[in-house]
Image: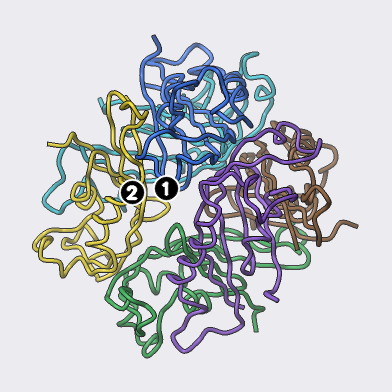
Chain colours: A green, B yellow, C purple, D brown, E cyan, F blue
């Protein structure tokens, strides 16, 4: 199994609903460092899983819709808690890791439908 | 010259005033990884610049007043842009570095008054 | 598959029995940076795998029993080599990585019984 | 499942054939940070997956054949694109990750034949 | 003293002239992670040392002239050894650090003329 | 001002004397990641501050005397607390940083006599 991973980051505000979140129920923010991994059983004739430059550009486009926003105000997330786990599945291309600070991160891993 | 550095992080929302900030004029957020460095010409009889545990606890107390807040709503920052540079000077104990994402960080360095 | 990872560290002394360990047969020490990953097929109604704060507190409690000790003197490890691999399985909650220095680390991965 | 990972790096020149590579079709170079992971269901009587020192030495020998070379001139890679994915499979011991810069890396994962 | 640092990377081939360089006399390559630090005694009315976005764009332009090239073939470096130290001074904006691999890096630090 | 930094690590046991050290009064251990920086106003005819390979070898020799030892038993440290600050000055070549865990490190900086 081959894989290629590209990484970019986004800087967002949000708040979380539920007593379990403690102080994170307040409006606060995060720099999420996103790592998107693409996997393939074989590499193509050029010797690659995919075009790394295009993969990185695609990741930047996906994150660009969220970057520098307050996630609480985005229509597509209405009524949802934008936890690190939830965002990992939203951004997900194959395996996605979101590092929210030096001691906590979340990931979502699934085949593309 | 000896130095000791301790590090902790905080997760805040804020917005910045001025066309120079582009999309960062919108309410967004950041995980700031803070590195506070304390310097001294000599070490004491115990062989230390200061008690690392106490320095780390002190840093956590200082950051605890800001952590999980929207800085736009804090009275002490009213009318100020809470840029990475500004925050470095606010938190500053001797030399402070704030890493806001993997490709940009700011620092403030000055003797304590 | 969702996962959440929390990280903390511990600083211990130990020695290892067996010619294969070379100089590590002498009493020496290590800072182990521990990464504990918890996995779940779905997230709950709050949008999380688990409470990150509680997971981090739990990890600190588990590591607190070992931190700042000579592992050679702990009753529970008597007659065992406290290798990085062995410790990963001891601390293990689901997947545990212990980084012992910048060029070597070990992990243990298993379902909870 | 236990695993041990050792890491070393190499500094090589190469060029890549195919329009998909854009500017990387020119002769350029990379520092590849290689992480080789070895896995085993159980640890041996000494409490280890393998001898970490020997694993690191072995990795250095494998990388030593490539280090400080122009990969375009090596006979064994004639007619092949030495992409990060391809190199991961060449170096591969069980799971190999090659980090080529801070925002892109590739891996190859397979059982040993 | 305030400072802001921005970081980007480049991937180049080169060789070095002189017995002191051992195997690095052969054509090889490197990923250089460049950190450019800008310093100023005060911050401006907007609360910044400079526009981070513009600083990062400027750094990318400067590095873009070198990226994906064989430095041995660039006219401006003819007759010079493109060591890490030399490149740090070439790229230099105020303080520049070039990390060439996980265990070696170089820097150049000087006021702008 | 030019500088070159090389890095290696050591794994030692030790204990510290004085109530200020709390649990670190017990025999415990650490992985110290050592960064040794060498500075020079100019580079030589070869374009370097010094031979990086030789600098790294020298650092390994210096650290080799301490690596895999219990510092409490070394004659040269008798009656001294082997704090991170103290060790930084002992190992010191020009500027030395010792990272003892992800949130605390110490440095010593002085001209060579």
Residue B80: mark in rendering: none
Q: Mark 2 highlights which residue?
A: B56
CB of mark 2 within 8 Å of CB of mark 1? yes
Q: Residue at x 67, y 78 (%)?
A: A111
Of residue B58 and residue D62, the one placed in the foreground of this image is B58
Of residue D50 and residue B50, the one placed in the foreground of this image is B50
Give the answer, above or below, for where C94 lies relative to C8: below
Query: What's the CA distance linking mark 2 and mark 1?
Result: 8 Å
Q: Is residue B30 left or right of residue E71?
A: left
Q: Residue B110: x, y in percent?
A: 19, 36
Tell me if mark 1 has few (under 14), some (14-19) or many (20+) residues whose alpha carbon lies within 10 angstroms of its own.
Answer: some
Tell me if mark 2 has few (under 14), some (14-19) or many (20+) residues whose alpha carbon lies within 10 angstroms of its own.
Answer: some
Secondary structure, mark 2, is helix
Q: Residue F67: x, y in percent?
A: 61, 29
The number of callouts visible is 2
Quarter holding the C terminus of chain C is: bottom right
Of residue A69 and residue C113, the one placed in the foreground of this image is C113
Give the answer, above or below, for where D12 lies relative to E76: below
Q: Mark 1 highlights which residue?
A: F103
Chain under disc 2:
B
Mark 2 against mark 1, which lies toward the viewer? 2
Q: Pick out the residue farthest to the top.
A: F113
Q: Residue at x 55, y 75 (%)?
A: A92
Of residue F95 and residue D98, the one placed in the foreground of this image is F95
Q: Is residue A52 left or right of residue D52?
A: left
Chain under disc 1:
F
Q: Is residue D34 left or right of residue C53?
A: right
């Amino acid at each position: 199994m081959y894989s290629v991973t590209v990484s970019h980051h986004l800087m967002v505000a949000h708040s979380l609903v539920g007593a379990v979140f403690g102080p994170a129920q307040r409006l606060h923010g995060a720099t999420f460092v996103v790592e998107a991994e693409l996997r393939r059983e074989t590499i193509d004739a050029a010797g690659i899983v995919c075009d790394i430059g295009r993969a990185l550009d695609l990741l930047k486009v996906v994150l660009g819709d969220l970057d520098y926003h307050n996630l609480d105000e985005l229509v597509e997330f209405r009524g949802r808690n934008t936890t690190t786990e939830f965002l990992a599945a939203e951004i997900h291309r194959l395996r996605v890791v979101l590092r929210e600070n030096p001691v906590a991160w979340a990931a979502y891993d699934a085949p593309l439908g």
